[in-house]
Amino acid sequence: MAEAVAAISLPAPKGHAMPVAVVVAVIVVIWYGAAIPMNAVLADPRIAAAGGGFYNTLAISWSLDRPVIPVPHQIAVELWNSVFLVAPWKVKSLLYHLWVTLSSTLIGFGLGTLLGIALAIGIVHVRSLEKSLMPWIIASQTIPILAIAPMIIVVLGKTGLPDVLTKAVISTYLCFFPVTIGMVKGLRSPDRLALDLMRTYSANAAQALWKLRFPAAVPFLFASLKVAVAIALTGAIVAELPTGAVAGIGARLLQGSYYGQTLQIWAALFVAAFAAAALVWAVGVTERLNQRRMGGRP
Amino acid sequence: MSRAIGTSVAVLAVLLAASAVVMAGFAAVEPFKGGYWALSFIFLVLGWAIAWALGWVVDVLLARAGSPERVGNLLVPALFGIAVIVSWEIYVAGSQIPVVLLPSPSEIWAKLITSLPILGADFVQTIVRAVIPGWIIGCLAGFLVALLCDRVDFLRRGLLPLGNLVAALPIVGVAPILVMWFGFDWPSKAAMVVVMTFFPMLINALAGLAASGHMERDLMRSYGASWGQTLISLRLPAAMPFVFNALKINSTLALIGAIVAEFFGTPIVGMGFRMSTEVGRQGLDMVWAEIAVAALAGSAFYGLLVALERGVTFWHPSYRK
């Protein structure tokens, strides 16, 4: 894609590091700048009390306790304080909340992946399953599951399931869809010739699945898994929002918004973002390791 | 054809009746009383068996009737859906599961009919005021930025990796901040929808703008077409499948964004507000009625987009006969 576009514009040296750095720098500068007018309501009286002036404006706008918008270094300090200066098993530690969220994310991701693969194998092998299930699998995703997550949490909570599993159910529901779609595509990706070869070997369906279809589907699986793990995390966070959940990133966001603790909200958001990036990265690394073991060339 | 439908409906009825008897029998037996889990499992297995049998029967009938594929593609899922609703009704009646856990479809329907004014007000607040304007603004902004990136390659190389990263982040978490900035009423929800729909459109539109082939572009160059002319007559049409993909993804995301933002503070109207308060008051029938409205609105919106896509990208290989 990059080549195609470069061909019609300029044969400029390609690369992302430099442009990304510039864009990020511009965003940070705009952020610091915007913080002054946005925080003005809170900061102005204090700036006036301190005698005004350029230095006071910056110093006070960028160091409010509960700013309308905190600036990046305030968030960094808050992150440092709540990640490294508190023991990870204390309620004040963000690592503790991250662990609560991650545990249900990973359970949901695992279950969703298994369910998705199982559905895909069924759909590829049984024609009536494809006809009866596929439209409903697609329809299932037009229902805004995240929006009804609170109800599902409450209802499942009444049946006595542990919290971590009820939240995992939401993640599972979100996860299975991309995996099913990707795997159906992947399991069908071997061409006629390869399938015919399996037939001439008189391989049965299970052998064809295991030795041909599944290996062929692995790249599709990993592409789906990257999407799935990201939405699993989103699902777990939203599942923590309602019902006054006491722990987890979502609960942290909710408490922050109840008590106007902006720094707490932003710190929780950044931790969630780092976690999402780390999860997607971990799937990517697994993909590369697996590729190498399967004999793929980089 | 009508014989095929008649037979499959008859088969459906017989299977459902059989499962009802089995269900009632299990509900009466002591070890299963109140044991929703065991029952649910049996129910699932039965439901699956029914769906399987149905699909098979309809397949055979359709093959024998020699009718077009399309009818089967509509008929099978429709029958499957009816089977799900009917078995749900039977299951609720048979297991006597409390209404605070799972109301039956008929109870939900009754609630939906009697509380249309409330549902209507919630619909206007959430869908008309927040989802639709937010969706339009977000998609438009994403598309315009994509066009800008297309002109300025430096921006494209800087924004695309960031856009891909942001698309993987749990963006719904921004909701409390937006509620703080834009207040409790619908503007904060619309803003949430804008934020959620922006990046998918940006990424897809950029991919779409790069989708036209070398040959076609070279042809446009040999015609001496300007950037604008190439855009209008070649690259925008080629980008449309990608744009519609984003529009469809965003239709679901928009609904989610608006409803989730309502969990963080709202006036006393709106679908998200209604759901979270009714869950607290154990009015699960009302919650399900809202879900039905949301699902219906979401599906209708999606269907509209699919129809529009068919009209705009009629040339795409996936629509060829």
Image (spheres, rainbow, N blue to C red):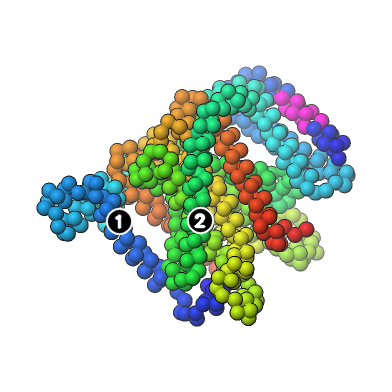
Q: Residue under label 1, please give it.
A: A34
Relative to residue A200, is residue B217 drawn left or right? left
Question: What is the spatial separation of the Cα atoms under label 1 and label 2, in whole angstroms?
Answer: 24 Å
Query: Magenta part mainly helix, strand or loop?
Result: helix
Residue in the picture at 42% in, 37% down: B263
> Label 2 neighbourhood size at 10 Å, few (<14), some (14-19), many (20+)?
some
Q: Residue under label 2, please give it.
A: B140
Residue A50 in view = yes
Residue in the picture at 24% in, 50% down: A40
Tell me where residue B112 appears, x and y as whole percent. Answer: 58, 27
Q: How many marks?
A: 2
Q: Which residues are magenta?
A: B10-20
Q: Quadrant of the C terminus of chain B?
A: bottom right
Q: Quadrant of the N terminus of chain B?
A: top right
Q: Is residue B293 shown in magenta?
A: no
Residue A289 in view = no
Q: Is residue B12 shown in magenta?
A: yes
Tell me where residue A262 appears, x and y as whole percent. Answer: 30, 46
Q: Nearer the viewer, residue A167 or B142?
A: B142
User: Label 1 amino acid?
Assistant: Ala
Tell me where residue B21 appears, x and y as whole percent. Answer: 73, 23
Give the letter of the chain under mark 2.
Answer: B
Residue in the picture at 76% in, 64% down: A192
Residue in the picture at 49% in, 58% down: B142
Residue A237 tag number = none
Relative to residue A22, is residue A285 drawn left or right? right
Above or below: residue A259 compared with residue A95: above
